[in-house]
Image (spheres, rainbow, N blue to C red):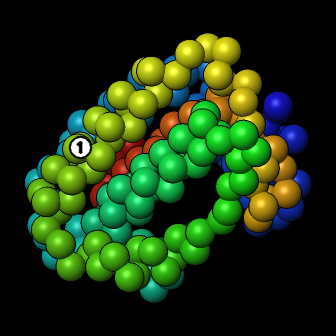
Amino acid sequence: MTPSETATSPEYSFLDRQLGLLGDRDPIEVLAETPAALAALVEGHSEERLARRPEPNVWSPREIIGHLIDADWVLGFRARIVRADQEPTLVPVDQELWVERQGWNRRPTAELLALFGQVRAVTVDFWRGVEPHELERSGRHTGAGIDISLGLLSRIQAGHDLSHRQQMGRYLGHP
């Protein structure tokens, strides 16, 4: 499936951008490097700056890290459903509510980075265990109205990481 085939509605057009950011990179390598990349982005910044939203409806760096923790749970669950279930169905989540209700911005950055590192280690372990023939298995995403293969899910997650790494870099003044 090409990036343009993934975005059947404006609500999911962000997938094209995420897949474009990934390009030909190995998604597992991107996922594995993200904890260190996030730590480098926030290094030297105050807790106050890391908790501040650059604009009212734009997440703070701490909220982005929390969102990436949530994404590992959600995308990891979706990947396991596609890998194991007979007729996998993937449901959307309201990421705004997840960030708000998890209270990510009230937690220290070091705690969030440690938690993300732990969750991400499980994620990378999962992806390294997926056999090449399993990457073709797919599930139906009810919100997007498309079938998403396990291989595409890994690419979406890695592109998602890169998108949020860029977002944090722009806000924190990193190229």
Residue name at image x 82 percent, y 32 percent: 2
Residue name at image x 58 percent, y 74 percent: 94
Estimate the x, y position of residue 18 in percent, counting from the top left. 63, 44
Mark 1 surroundings: few (<14), some (14-19) or many (≥20) residues within 10 A: some
Q: Is residue 7 left or right of residue 56?
A: right
Disc 1 is placed on an element classified as: helix
The answer to whether 85 is drawn above or below residue 25 in the figure is below
Q: Is residue 150 left or right of residue 44?
A: right
- Residue 10 or residue 82, whichever sits in front: 82
Estimate the x, y position of residue 172 in percent, counting from the top left. 31, 58
Residue name at image x 41 percent, y 60 percent: 70
Identify residue for label 1: 117
Identity of the residue furthest to the top in this view: 132
Residue 37 visible, this orientation = no
Residue name at image x 68 percent, y 55 percent: 90
The answer to whether 106 is drawn above or below residue 142 in the figure is below
Q: Is residue 102 left or right of residue 51?
A: right
The quadrant the N terminus occupies is top right
Estimate the x, y position of residue 80 in percent, counting from the top left. 54, 41
The answer to whether 149 is drawn above or below residue 105 in the figure is above
Identity of the residue furthest to the bottom in this view: 56
The quadrant the C terminus occupies is top left
